[in-house]
Image (spheres, rainbow, N blue to C red):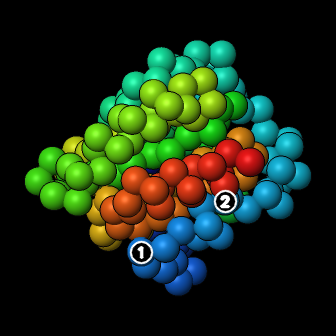
Amino acid sequence: MKKNILFIISLALFFTACGQKNKQTTEQNGNPKEDTTEAYSHLNPDQDGSSLKDNENLSGKVISLSSDDFMKIVKIDQGKGLLYKGKTPCIIDFYAEWCRPCMQLKPITEKFAEKYKGKLIIYKVNVDKAQDICQALGIQSIPTLFFFKPNAQPGKMVGAPSEAELEKVIEDFLK
């Protein structure tokens, strides 16, 4: 456990040193970088003992994740960044119950989880219960949304988008 915490802290320092920006924009319009497929081609996504690719929840519901659950679907690799272990694109919403913009975003994410059922999974992570993950990812403002596709680095959006803005980002993301 101590080893994992030290690794997460090291990763947070790495991201901070790389000058990660926290603006109310989406990195590359919500589309992850597509040039990392080759970097991950040697990895077996199930090497950590998970079989996520066969057990994805495509129910159309927003799924809450703990820190441990997050680590089952996203591998944090200090050299290669974040590796999504699933096969269905996903959004991970970092939120807090006390955050008004987060609560305004909640019904929108629930609507889109149902609308894009089978094409997109929407997860949520409570920042008050997953501070280690938030620190490792450099999350300083909420809501923060990460957009994951297999074999690609995630896109990121900080702040609460309108329903129309989020729908456009999702449509572009799923292309």
> Vertical placement of 118 versus 127: above or below?
above
Mark 1: secondary structure:
loop
**Total label count?**
2
- Considering depth in this image, is 71 or 3 the residue closer to the camera? 71
Left or right, 156 with respect to 47, comes to left
Q: Position of residue 74 (x, y in %)?
A: 55, 42
User: Type of residue at label 2?
Assistant: Asn
The residue most toward the front is 164
Q: For residue 131, which quarter of the picture? A: bottom left
- How many neighbours does mark 2 have within 10 angstroms: few (below 14), some (14-19), or many (20 or more)? many
The residue shown at (74%, 48%) is 175
Q: Position of residue 43 (x, y in %)?
A: 78, 39
> Vertical placement of 102 versus 111: above or below?
below
| Residue 50 visible in this rendered orientation of the protein | no
Give the Cα separation between the discs numbered 2 and 1: 15 Å
Mark 2: secondary structure:
loop
The residue shown at (58%, 16%) is 55
Residue placed under numbered mark 1 in the picture: 24
The residue shown at (23%, 60%) is 101
User: Type of residue at label 1?
Assistant: Gln
Question: Residue 31: which disc?
Answer: 2
> Vertical placement of 21 versus 157: above or below?
below
Left or right, 35 with respect to 30, comes to right
- Point out the image quarter for the N terminus: top left
Q: Position of residue 135 (x, y in %)?
A: 36, 62
Q: Position of residue 46 (x, y in %)?
A: 68, 26
| Residue 14 visible in this rendered orientation of the protein | yes
- Considering depth in this image, is 119 or 72 the residue closer to the camera? 119
